[in-house]
Structure formats: C-alpha cells, structure tokens
Amino acid sequence: MQNEPHRQMSILDKWHHLSKRSRKFMKGWGANVGRDLRVQKALLLEEIRSLDLRVDTSGISAEEWPHRYNLEDSLMDIYSKEEEYWCQRGSMNWVLFGDANTAYFQAIANGRRRRCSIPLLWAGAQLLQDPPAIRAHVDGFYKSLFVGQPRGGAPLADHIWSSSQQVSPAENAPLLALFDATEVETFVKAMNPTLAPGPDGLPVRFFQASWPMVKDIILDLFLELSRGTLDVSRLNYGIISLIPKVPGAADIR
C-alpha cells in the first residue's frame, strides 16, 4: 500500500500546532514555577525561624540583621505571588475587599471545578449517569440547537440606496487594504492583558509578551483573512459551558 502524499501544512495547521505546544509548555512551566516557589518558601521560613531562635537565645550580630530583613522581603514577595494566583483563580469579588488568602478561600476557589461536574442528566424520561451517554446527549442537544436554517425573508433591492448613499471606491479602498504589521502590533499591545483567554486557551498577556515570536504567523493569518482564503470556520468557534441556574439542575433546556 502506498503512503498518502504529504499534505502541505496550512497556516491554520501551523497556528494550531504552535498554540498547542505553547499551552503544553506553559502548563509544565507553571507547575515547575509553583514547585520552586514552594521549595523556596520552605527554605526561607526555615532560615528565618533559625535566625529568630538565635535572637531569643544568644542573639545575632548587627551584620546579620540586614540579611534577616532581606529574607523577610523575599518571603513577602512569594506571598504576594500566591495571593495574585488565588485571586485570579478564584475570580471572587469579595477577595478584592480585603479577604485573606486563607485555606477557606482556596477551598472555595477549587470548588468551582467540582460544581461544574455533571453527575447525571435527564433525557426526557431517561436518566443518564454514564459520562459517555451524558456527553452524547449534550453534544446532540447543541448540534440540533445550532443547526443552520435556510435563509428566508425578502432581500433588499439593489436600487434601495442612491449612489450618494453608497460607499465610493475611494472610501472602499482603505477598507479593502491589507493589514499593516504596525497597526496589528499596536492593537495587540493596546488590549487589556487581563481579558479572559480565547477558545485556544491563550490569554492576551501571552500575545503581548511573545509578540516577537508569534507575530509572523499572526500576520500570515491576517493576510489570508484579507485575501478571503482563510478557513474562518476553524477559528470562529466557541466553547459552551454548562452552568446550572438553579440548585440540582439535571436537564438541559
């Protein structure tokens, strides 16, 4: 059997490959950073505890006090990073009004994932408890909900607007012009870095920080969009999250 001919990778294939590798790298990087911070915090606490014990017994020299203060500053920096992490993960308004980074708050933040689990669903009179059956029911429900319908209604006549009301060729020229690299970069840098990530899971901060590395492939995407050769259906998609509006919700409607 002959091998299939090698298919040239499109710009969308390159972008999906890049975004997948980026998410995988950042996930591993985040785990390593978290582990390093925990180890560093434990070492700082142990050294501070040792110095404080010497202060209560034999005392420490004047040269050691600045080191003691530097250790405390480093520890407070780690605490600040932990606070920011849990604040972003929790997405709770009340943390903005002075709530501490307590075990209770962390439990609340972690509970969001547990609340999103779906242990059972009713499909009419049938109770679904098997995860594959639940997944198939949800998938079928939204496929039937968002299925395309034939376009109806009366179209507008070509002569409904006069020539003075239509866009002139001179006005249309800048609208059809290719995207400029400078204007795309300016737009990316002006975006709010704390916006929620898109369907690809990459936040705005990623594009701003990694712009020199990703700008070429992003500009190629814009170029194909201008030419009308970009398969927008592979980019223009969304992720549906099932959020229960009432306690004990067990059906989709």
Image (cartoon, rainbow, N blue to C red):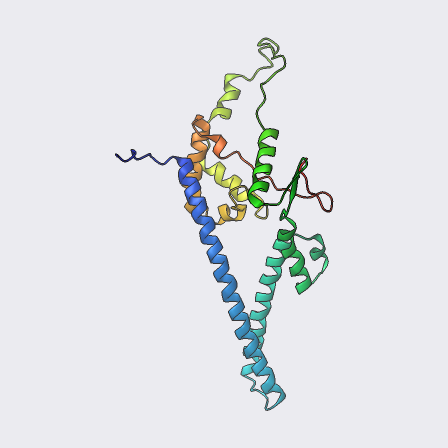
230 up-or-down from 112: above or below: above
- The reply to whether residue 79 is in sight is yes
Q: Residue furthest bottom?
A: 58
Nearest the viewer among 44 and 67 is 44
Q: Tell me: residue 4, above or below residue 156.
A: below
| Number of numbered callouts drawn | 0
Q: Nearer the viewer, residue 184 or 243?
A: 243
Q: Is residue 102 visible?
A: no
Which quarter of the rendered picture does the C terminus lie within? top right
Question: Image check: 30 left or right of 119?
Answer: left
Residue 73 location (% of width, % of height): 58, 71
Residue at 58 percent of width and 45 percent of height: 130
State the residue lying farthest toward the left: 2
Q: Residue 199 location in percent, x, y?
A: 54, 41
Where residue 189 appears, as percent x and y from the top left, is 52, 44
Residue at 40% in and 40% down: 14
Residue 52, how many percent across, how many down? 60, 82
Residue name at image x 53 percent, y 48 percent? 205
Quadrant in which residue 144 is drawn: top right
State the residue at coordinates (43%, 48%): 21
If the image is split into quadrants, where does the N terminus sit?
Answer: top left
